[in-house]
Image: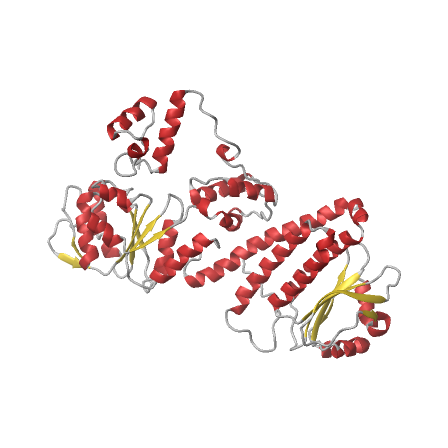
C-alpha cells in the first residue's frame, strides 16, 4: 500500500525534518481512539469527552482554537458556543452570536451543509467581508468550519478549528479526517439531545458506526505503512510491534547493532529470531553486504564442515570442485548460525577458533585463511543445559553469549497481535489482489486469547489461509480447534499420565536428563522415563 499523503497542515515556513511522518501517525492513532471512545459513550459524559477531544486534536495538529457552535431548532439564525478549547491568553469570546448579522455569508453555507475553509483571510470572497472582519477580531488567521448534522438530518451547529499565530493550509486529506471528528461529535450530541429519536433511527446509527469501524480498520492498515517507514530508518522495517517486550528487544538490538560483538539470539520457534538478526545486521557498518545464513540443523553432519569452512577439489569422494564456505562468503559481513545448538561437538572447536582469531582451513588443505566476519548465533534450545549435559562446549557458549537477546513469544506480546494481523493483511492484499479492510472486534479478541504455540509464523500462516477463502472486504478467520474451548479431559489413568508427561516434555523442549530436565521434574530416572514414554506411545519429535 502506498504511504499515506501528508495530512498535517503546513505553515509558511518548512516543517522540521522527520516531524511530519511521526505527527501523521500520532494523528491517525488519535482518530482511531476517538472513534472507539464515542461509540458507546453514555449521554452524561458527552460534553466532557468532546472538550477533551478538542484539546487532543488541537495539541496533535498544533492548532490554537476549537469551538463547537449549536443552533437552537426554534432560532436558526443564532449560535451558542457549547464546547471550546481556547489558549489561556485569548480574550473572552461571546457565548451567543446572531449569525445573520455577524456571519451572514458563512451561516448560509453552513446551513446548506458546506464546509468553509479560510487558509488566508485575504482569499475570502468580497461577499464574506463582514464574516472575515469578525474572524480577525477573534484573532484567527486561518479557519476551517464544518457543519454538524446526524443521520442525514439538518445542520444543527458547526465545529471550528483555527490558528492565531500564522496562516495554515488545510489539505483535503486533513479536512476529510476533521469531518470524521465532526461526525462523531454530531452523533454523540444527537444521542444526548434525544435518546428516543436516536433509538427510532437505530438502523441508520448502526450504519454510521459501521462506517466509523471500517474507517478505523483502514487506519490500522495505513498505520502499518507509516510504522514501516519509521522502522525502516532504524533497520527493523519487518519487525512489527509496540509492546514493552518487543521495544525492550529492539532497544538491545540498537545498542549492539553498530558494534562487531557476537550476539546470541534465543527464542521459541517462529518467534522471529532471523528477523532480529537481519535488523542487527542492518544497524551495523556491514549492512552494505548481504547477510549470510546457515541452518545448522538442516544439514547432515558430514556436510556441515564443508558448508561452513569450504573444501578443496578432491577433499573427499564426490568433491569434484573447490567450494568456498559460508565464512568466506560472509567476509566483511555478518554470518548467522541458526539452530547453533545442533552443531556437532567436533565442529565446535573449529568454530571457536574462527571466533577467536578469524582463521580456519578449508577441508583438504592446510592453508590458513583469514576472514573478518561478525557472528550472530540463534537457537530455540537451552544452551546452558546442553553445556551441563556435555553436548555443547562451555568455552564456545561463553564466546557466543557475549550479548544475549531473548525474542519474546507472541503470547507475551498480545498487544502486538492487531498490528501483526493488519501487516499480514496488507501483505496478502497486495499478493492476492484482494481488498480486505475490516475484521470484527470479536475475531480480533479471539486472536488475542489464542496461545500461539507457533508464534508469529503460525499467525502469518493463519492469516494467509483466511485471506484465500475470504470473500468481500471483511476477513473471516477460523482458529485451530484448541482455541475455541478447553482440551478434552482425559478419562483414564493412562491418558492422564500420557498427557502429564507430554506437557512436561514440551515445557522443557523435550530435554529428558540433566538439571531441570523432564526426568528431574517428574522425579524419575532418565531410563525409567524413556521406558514410560515407550509404553505410553510418546515418540520424541525429530529436531
Res. 358 image quadrant: bottom left
Which residue is pictured at 24% across the width and 28% down the height?
527
Which residue is pictured at 17% across the width and 50% down the height?
350
Which residue is pictured at 48% across the width and 58% down the height?
228
Foreground pick, 160 / 194: 194
Residue 179 shows up from this direction:
no
Q: Quadrant of the C terminus?
A: top left
Q: Quadrant of the N terminus?
A: bottom right
Q: Position of residue 270 (x, y in %)?
A: 40, 44
Q: Position of residue 244 (x, y in %)?
A: 46, 54
Q: Position of residue 344 (x, y in %)?
A: 21, 43
Side of 472 relative to 324 (left or right): right
State whether residue 480 is above or below residue 135: above
Res. 330 image quadrant: bottom left
State whether residue 122 is above or below residue 266: below
Which residue is pictured at 43% across the width and 43% down the height?
455
Q: Which residue is most to the top?
A: 492
State whether residue 62 is above or below residue 275: below
Q: Which residue is most to the right?
A: 74
Side of 522 relative to 300 (left or right): right
Residue 447 shows up from this direction:
yes
Q: Position of residue 77 (x, y in %)?
A: 86, 66
Side of 66 relative to 354 (left or right): right
Q: Which residue is most to the front?
A: 523
Number of numbered discs visible in the structure rendering: 0
Amino acid at each position: 500500500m502506498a504511504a499515506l499523503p501528508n495530512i498535517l497542515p503546513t505553515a509558511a515556513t518548512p516543517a522540521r525534518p522527520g516531524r511530519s511522518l511521526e505527527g501523521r501517525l500520532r494523528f491517525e492513532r488519535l482518530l482511531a481512539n476517538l472513534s472507539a471512545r464515542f461509540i458507546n459513550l453514555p449521554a452524561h459524559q458527552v460534553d466532557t469527552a468532546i472538550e477533551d477531544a478538542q484539546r487532543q486534536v488541537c495539541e496533535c495538529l498544533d492548532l490554537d482554537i476549537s469551538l463547537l457552535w449549536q443552533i437552537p431548532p426554534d432560532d436558526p439564525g443564532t449560535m451558542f458556543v457549547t464546547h471550546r478549547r481556547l489558549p489561556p491568553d485569548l480574550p473572552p469570546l461571546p457565548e451567543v452570536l446572531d449569525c445573520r448579522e455577524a456571519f451572514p455569508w458563512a451561516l448560509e453555507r453552513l446551513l446548506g451543509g458546506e464546509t468553509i475553509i479560510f487558509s488566508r483571510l485575504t482569499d475570502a470572497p468580497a461577499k464574506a467581508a463582514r464574516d472575515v472582519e469578525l474572524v480577525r477580531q477573534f484573532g484567527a488567521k486561518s479557519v476551517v468550519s464544518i457543519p454538524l448534522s446526524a443521520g442525514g438530518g439538518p445542520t444543527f451547529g458547526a465545529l471550528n478549528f483555527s490558528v492565531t499565530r500564522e496562516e495554515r493550509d488545510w489539505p483535503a486529506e486533513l479536512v476529510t479526517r476533521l469531518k470524521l471528528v465532526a461526525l462523531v461529535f454530531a452523533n454523540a450530541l444527537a444521542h444526548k439531545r434525544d435518546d428516543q429519536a436516536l433509538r427510532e433511527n437505530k438502523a441508520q446509527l448502526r450504519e454510521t458506526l459501521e462506517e466509523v469501524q471500517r474507517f478505523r480498520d483502514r487506519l490500522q492498515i495505513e498505520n502499518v505503512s507509516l510504522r514501516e517507514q519509521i522502522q525502516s530508518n532504524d533497520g527493523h522495517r519487518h519487525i512489527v510491534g509496540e509492546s514493552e517486550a518487543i521495544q525492550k528487544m529492539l532497544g538491545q538490538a540498537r545498542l549492539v547493532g553498530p558494534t562487531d560483538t557476537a550476539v546470541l539470539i534465543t527464542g521459541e520457534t517462529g518467534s522471529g529470531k532471523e528477523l532480529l538478526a537481519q535488523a542487527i545486521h542492518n544497524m551495523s557498518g556491514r549492512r552494505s553486504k548481504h547477510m549470510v545464513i546457515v541452518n545448522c540443523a538442516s544439514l547432515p553432519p558430514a556436510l556441515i564442515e564443508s558448508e561452513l569452512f569450504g573444501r578443496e577439489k578432491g577433499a573427499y569422494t564426490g568433491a569434484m570442485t573447490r567450494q568456498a564456505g559460508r565464512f568466506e562468503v560472509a567476509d566483511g559481513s555478518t554470518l548467522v548460525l541458526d539452530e547453533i545448538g545442533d552443531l556437532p561437538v567436533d565442529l565446535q572447536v573449529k568454530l571457536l577458533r574462527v571466533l577467536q582469531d578469524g582463521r580456519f582451513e578449508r577441508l583438504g588443505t592446510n592453508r590458513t585463511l583469514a576472514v573478518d566476519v561478525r557472528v550472530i548465533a540463534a537457537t530455540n534450545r537451552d544452551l546452558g543445559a546442553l553445556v551441563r549435559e556435555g553436548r555443547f562446549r562451555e568455552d564456545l557458549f561463553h564466546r557466543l553469549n557475549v550479548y544475549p537477546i531473548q525474542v519474546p513469544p507472541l503470547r507475551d506480546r498480545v498487544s502486538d497481535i492487531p498490528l501483526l494481523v493488519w501487516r499480514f493483511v496488507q501483505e496478502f492484499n497486495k499478493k492476492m489482489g484482494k481488498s480486505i479492510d475490516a475484521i470484527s472486534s470479536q475475531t480480533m479478541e479471539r486472536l488475542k486469547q489464542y496461545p500461539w504455540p507457533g508464534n508469529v509464523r503460525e499467525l502469518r500462516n493463519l492469516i494467509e489461509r483466511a485471506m484465500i477463502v475470504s470473500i468481500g472486504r471483511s476477513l473471516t478467520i477460523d482458529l485451530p480447534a484448541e482455541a475455541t474451548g478447553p482440551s478434552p479431559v482425559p478419562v483414564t489413568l493412562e491418558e492422564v499420565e500420557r498427557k502429564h508427561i507430554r506437557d512436561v516434555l514440551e515445557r522443557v523442549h523435550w530435554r529428558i536428563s540433566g538439571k531441570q530436565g523432564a526426568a528431574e521434574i517428574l522425579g524419575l530416572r532418565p531410563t525409567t522415563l524413556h521406558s514410560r514414554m515407550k509404553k505410553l506411545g510418546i515418540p520424541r519429535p525429530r529436531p
